[in-house]
Amino acid sequence: MALATVLYLIYLFTPIVLLFVGSFGHIWFNTLLPTGVTLEWYLQVASDGSFRRAFWTSLQVCTLTCVIGALIGTPLAYAIYRAASQQVRAAARVIYLLPIAVPPLVLAFGFILVFSSDELPFLGSLWILVGGHLVLTLPYLLHTLIGDMRHLRLTEQELAAEALGAGFWQRFRDIVLPSLRHSLASGLITVAALSIGEFQLSNLVAGFLTRPYPVVLLQAFYGATGFACAATVVLLVLALAASAGGALTARGAQGVHGLSA
Amino acid sequence: MSEPEYTIALEGVTFTYPGTDIGVHDVTLGIRPGELLAVIGPSGCGKSTLLKIIAGFVQPSHGRVIIGGKDAAGIPPRQRNIGIVFQTYTLFPHMTAWENVAYPLKLRGQDQASRRAKAVDILGRVGLGTQTEKLPAQLSGGQQQRVALARALVFDPQALLLDEPLSALDAALRVEMRDEIRRLQRMHHIATMHITHDQEEALSMADRVAVMQNGRLVQVDRPRDIYARPVNREVADFIGQANLWTGHITGPTNVDTPFGALTTLPHGRNTGDTVAVLVRPEGLLLGRGPGGVNSFTGTVTRDRFLGSFRRFDFEIGGVTLLGETGDMGEIAAIYIPPTSIQLLPETGSAQS
């Protein structure tokens, strides 16, 4: 058991460690490890116009996906959870889990068909990326939120609040939203990480000036190894930062309500 | 306008869950000002439905709910001004104890300082003066229960509904909380409906007890009257300890039971009728009765010493009788005074 765990961890972390080593290595050619230490590769990535643009595109898409996802996902999750009939809940569940089952490629081809038309010429825009990421990430957010609502027995809490004199909006503001702050945070972490790392759909629907980071990153592997490693480490850091940002945003939004009783 | 006789009155209230016969049927019941009425019955008998109807969470298909002298039809739960304590307490996990208690005051537009003062004050009265800043998760079950009670009382509701509030507590705490609830209820002089399946809880706390079976109200009486004069076999069985046998009337003062013939007081029933024969354990007396009436010899098969009294099983010809006595001597014979024997309808509906 312990051996299996160790082997698994080695398998998991070796590529990441090698990426770090490679990104700081000066020359890495026909040797097990690179020789020499340098920051040159990071400076190159930072000064590369297409990487800089991709970096900001990814941040924007991720932020918008998180904000819009939270704004749509929270009421939607609540509506599904409170839906009166069992059949409605089951149907909603199937529909919102569908994007997980459908390959992003299929989704992307659909996007291309719809948004390359004259009526909806949005292919290549930032918003098409945000829309795609929303479709792909919303299931995870909804799943987290609805699970938490069940766990918290939100219906019972709302019944109690109602008996104490709270109307619908008061309950939503005072009970539902604050109760969900933890699951909203963890849901948004997932959303942020997925959005930053998304490649399949983004690669097909992004325009030349709106390519997100992973799409641009692919090209790095045709160049110097050190450059590719540095660019990948940047993505890793970006994903971690986005996750932390998603969590902090949720905390901050909840803090406004959490403090006042 | 004078105070209505009942703070809450149900008149012929019927509600069944869609597609079933489960619910409550034709319930007429009143809770007087300041009274604690316990509603008791086995699970599924409709007692929780009754609470939901009064709270306004479900609407009766027939009958009227009158709260404070006014027909409550169409009044949503949040405007009924009734305090409710749920089985699971339903404290808001993200609010501290005082914030939970202050929440109904916040909804009523009181400013932060005054609602905080009120919440802290009432928490002090339920013995939680030092726990006001704690979150529900940091409180024990009994403490959460007290917070829930304080929250249900703080906004001076016109009535209090308690839905099995003690069932989640351990036995010792449950007994303590009975007294606590009763004390608060008296202090606030608030009409209270206490739903429970625990007959001891109902008998020890309530001014009156309402017994429900299969969605119908079968008896409403003071605890001692319910115990002394149950309306049918089920109520007798459900409330307190009981010896119950199926008997046949053999004469104007005679009934046949599985362990022998008994002489009763004149009962006015027809010879040949089937009845339930009830004798409470304390109705069994030791020795032989005057003139040998209803006297039996037999053997004690179990003897439980319970401090000031003992509860024993006494076997007569294969039938076991349950008795209670403070006499710790040998038991060779028992007798049942005719005044201890009650004849009840064997099953079903209440007598007139």
Image: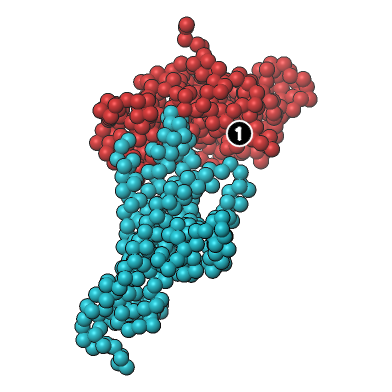
Foreground residue among A21 and B33 = A21
Residue B252 appears left or right of A161:
right
Q: Nearer the viewer, residue B276 or A193?
A: A193
Q: In the image, what residue type sits under mark 1? A: Cys
Q: Colour of chain B?
A: red
Q: Residue at x 34, y 45 (%)?
A: A254
Which quarter shows the C terminus of chain B? top right
Residue neighbourhood size for the residue with mark 1, other residues' Cα within 10 Å, grouped as few (<14), some (14–19), many (≥20): many
Residue at 27 percent across and 72 percent down: it is A47
Position of residue B254 measured from the top left corner of the image (x, y, whole percent): 71, 22
The answer to whether residue B236 is visible is: no
Provide residue B288's location: percent of width, then percent of height: 59, 26
Mark yes or no: residue B253 visible.
Answer: yes
Which residue in the protein does label 1 denote?
Answer: B45
> According to the rendering, which colour does chain A have?
cyan
Left or right: residue B102 versus residue A161 is left
- Left or right side of B182 for A48: left
Q: Quadrant of residue B247?
A: top right
Position of A87 relative to B111 (above/below):
below
Chain containing mark 1: B
Considering only vertical position in the picture, is A50 above or below A22?
above
> Residue at the location (45% across, 60% down)?
A125
- Label 1: which secondary element: loop
In percent of the image, x 33 and y 63: which residue is there? A56
